[in-house]
Amino acid sequence: MKLKLIPFLLFCIFLFSCKQKQKVDIIVHNGVVYTVDSSFTKAQAFAIKDGKFVAVGSNDEILNHYSATKTIDAGGKAIYPGLIDAHCHFYSYGKMKSEADLVGCLSFKEVIDRLVAYSKTNKSTWIIGRGWDQNRWPGKEFPVNDTLDLLFPNTPVYLSRVDGHAALVNQKALDLAAISSKTKIEGGKLMLKPQPTKETSNVLLSGILIDNACDLVKKVIPLPSKAEMKQYLLKAQEDCFKVGLTTIDDAGLDKNIIDLIDEMQKKGELKMRIYAMANPTDENLQYYLKHGPYKSDYLHVCSFKFYADGALGSRGACLLKPYLDRPNEQGFLLNKPDYYKEMAKKIAASSFQMNTHCIGDSANRFILDVYASVLGKDNKRRWRIEHAQIVNKDDFVKFGTYHILPSVQPTHATSDMYWAKDRIGVERLKGGYAYKQLMEENGVLPTGSDFPVESINPLLGFYAAFTRLDSIGFPPGGFQSENALTREEALKGMTIWAAYANFEEKEKGSIEPGKFADYVILDKDIMKVTPPEVFKTKVVTNSLR
Ligand SMILES: [Zn+2]
């Protein structure tokens, strides 16, 4: 009698367990899952339904309780939340891909050689290039446009510096923009050719434009068509997916591009999640302040992006004391102080964030004080300072006191470390690229790359953040290594802390039930492998791809 009961009981258990198994769309198991939850828990598996994580746990917990249409065996590989780039230029990156690539040129001659090659295959009305950096050339001096005028007398040429804060243009471009040596520019500069004599009647423009001067020429470059703009976005998405990104923060977009992104996302053409910072143009301010923040599963518009100053490389960063290598220069704010104060008041009265690019210690101090005056202590507005690159020692505390979030790019430290001390000296540099110190102010530090200024690969930022080394392991011990983050902090910077800076920590940034099922599987465990191995790590799966 008893023996006859056993098969019956087993059958009941079988039926019971079948009935209990919850149907989901995808199960991922047999992984080393870094959930990046508040206790930094590790798991082995998770279940996904309708694009959201529904359960995270051990292999047994997930496989015994869920059945899925698709089951993925991660083969013991490491899995992380989808990576977020908290500051980049997604659209510009895609656009740049259609332009002459001048990144990595080791001389001005190489710039010219690449342009000549480019102009043979690309026949458009303008020649646009991007990415040169005179700090990599012998002499480190800005170039002049003589050769461009010889080679391209009738085709306008616009070549952005790597940081986008300076450009070299030829005479044809200057003519089209009606720029002469008499043109006056607020928040920008036109550089002159070295003068043989002191006679001022004969001043000639060198073709180098700094900051707002660039806009005068950009204004006359024909706008791309809608089809071209779509191509730029799709190209950027393709490259982002390859390196594990699932959300990007585009630091400055106009409404027409934001609308196009929304349109493409709604049609399923664009799958990248985008936190779009709106440029503070009249049109954007008028529209968004009237309509309020916009949020879909794929797009979030809740901030405006301002520029306080320029970049250190082109000496446009606004400093409290003169540049060490140019005692007569101190950089400058790109607008009048009152402009930022008025804007801060206007935005404080709305529900938008204000995100301001600040490089120099003066720009950082000024904007921190402007923010502080409208936000007060213990506010929940999460206003951001983009880059927070050189901060005076007295100003760090303001980030914490007024809950202002520094949004930093760890590869900037290892790109600038070769020459930054020439610009500002050892003493000031101590408050530069001070990521650990900045992180400690609020206990969070969103990180990004600023691509296309730096590489699009977030793992290079992760590596730079915890090693403070360049790709060949220079300098020994790391650059100002007291400001290195731990690997855990570096991972949080490109996941949960970036989500926090976007007001998205409830739906992104960790592998937890209820959040978007954005994850990446890497071929190596970046939390464990040697630093050089991080460089070689590849993305096996990006959940959005
Ligand atoms: Zn940027």
Image: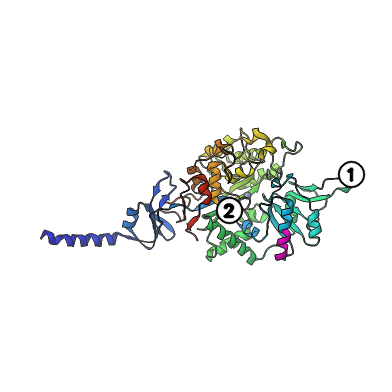
Q: Look at label 1 and name its amino acid.
A: Glu
Q: Nearer the viewer, residue 195 or 25?
A: 195
In the drawing, what numbered circle is on residue 456?
2
- At mark 2, the secondary structure is loop
Determine if residue 376 is in view.
no
Circles 2 and 1: CB distance less than 8 Å? no
Give the residue pinned by disc 1: 199
Main structural element of the magenta stretch: helix, strand or loop? helix
Q: Nearer the viewer, mark 2 or mark 1?
A: 2
Question: Is residue 13 inside the magenta stretch?
Answer: no
User: Going 44% across and 47% down the picture, which residue do you hit?
Assistant: 36
Determine if residue 311 is in view.
yes
Q: Is residue 353 above or below residue 430?
A: below
Q: Position of residue 450 (x, y in %)?
A: 60, 50
Q: Which residues are magenta?
A: 115-122
Q: Position of residue 251 (x, y in %)?
A: 61, 51
Q: Position of residue 360 (x, y in %)?
A: 66, 40
Question: How busy is the neighbourhood of tag 1: few (under 14 within 10 Å), some, or many (20 plus)?
Answer: few
- At mark 1, the secondary structure is loop
User: Going 84% across and 50% down the picture, which residue do you hit?
Assistant: 204
Q: Position of residue 267 (x, y in %)?
A: 53, 66
Question: Is residue 117 inside the magenta stretch?
Answer: yes
Q: Nearer the viewer, residue 201 or 441?
A: 201
